[in-house]
Image (cartoon, rainbow, N blue to C red):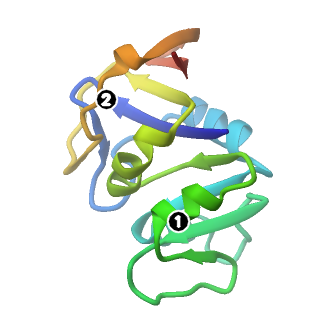
């Protein structure tokens, strides 16, 4: 199963200069609870961003796949040069955790979406790619503070 997880504001904003444009502890806790000890796929910039938060600590995932077309390799990650070959050969459940390009490429293959809606506009420069949410059905929704945690399954 391929799951995607992200938070976005009312304008579909997801980032600002390769960082989160907000700080909501409940959203961070939700992300950690869903992805801890899971295999994750991310782009190079998302990997570098996470490393600024974790610095010397290991990332809290079972396996880390980093997709980029360059031959950039990291000691604690598995390099994915061709994302379509990766999907074709995938034999495990995986969470897609960013960034924008990886989300856009993986949306057609995703079975489940974990979307946190941030109920406030923020400033930033990276937006989630537009897509047809009608291809998914809402299976869970929880409101907390200025956030809506929602889960969607592909129809």
Q: Nearer the viewer, residue 113 or 14?
A: 113
Does residue 79 lie above or below 145 as drawn? below
- The disc, 1 or 2, on the residue closer to the chain's N-terminal end is 2
Does residue 55 lie above or below 41 as drawn? below
Q: Nearer the viewer, residue 106 or 120?
A: 106
Residue at 74 percent of width and 58 percent of height: 60
Q: Are marks 1 and 2 in contact (CB under 8 Å)?
A: no
Rounded to the nearest angstrom, the CA distance separating label 1 from label 2 is 32 Å
Residue 111: name its quadrant. top right
Category of crowding for the residue at label 2, using alpha-carbon neighbours closer than 10 angstroms: few (below 14), some (14–19), many (at least 20): many
Q: Position of residue 136 (x, y in %)?
A: 46, 17
Residue at 27 percent of width and 61 percent of height: 17
Q: Secondary structure at mark 1?
A: helix
Does residue 99 lie above or below 132 as drawn? below
The mark found on residue 85 in the picture is 1
Q: Position of residue 14 (x, y in %)?
A: 33, 42
Horizontal side of 82 relative to 144 (left or right) equals left
Q: Position of residue 67 (x, y in %)?
A: 48, 69
Category of crowding for the residue at label 1, using alpha-carbon neighbours closer than 10 angstroms: few (below 14), some (14–19), many (at least 20): few
Residue at 36 percent of width and 33 percent of height: 8
Residue at 60 percent of width and 84 percent of height: 74
Residue 51: name its quadrant. bottom right
The mark found on residue 9 in the picture is 2
Q: Is residue 31 visible?
A: yes
Task: Give the position of the N terminus as an image quadrant.
Answer: top right
């Amino acid at each position: 199963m391929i799951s995607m997880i992200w938070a976005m504001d009312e304008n579909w904003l997801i980032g600002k200069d390769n960082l989160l444009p907000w700080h909501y502890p409940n959203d961070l806790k939700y992300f950690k609870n869903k992805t801890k000890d899971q295999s994750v796929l991310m782009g190079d910039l998302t990997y570098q961003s996470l490393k600024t938060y974790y610095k010397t600590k290991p990332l809290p995932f079972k396996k880390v796949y980093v997709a980029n077309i360059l031959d950039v390799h990291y000691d604690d990650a598995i390099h994915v040069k061709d994302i379509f070959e990766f999907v074709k050969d995938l034999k495990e459940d995986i969470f897609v955790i960013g960034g924008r390009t990886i989300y856009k490429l993986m949306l057609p293959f995703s079975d489940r979406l974990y979307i946190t809606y941030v109920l406030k506009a923020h400033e930033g420069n990276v937006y989630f790619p537009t897509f047809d949410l009608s291809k998914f059905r809402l299976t869970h929704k929880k409101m907390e503070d200025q956030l809506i945690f929602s889960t969607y399954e592909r129809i």
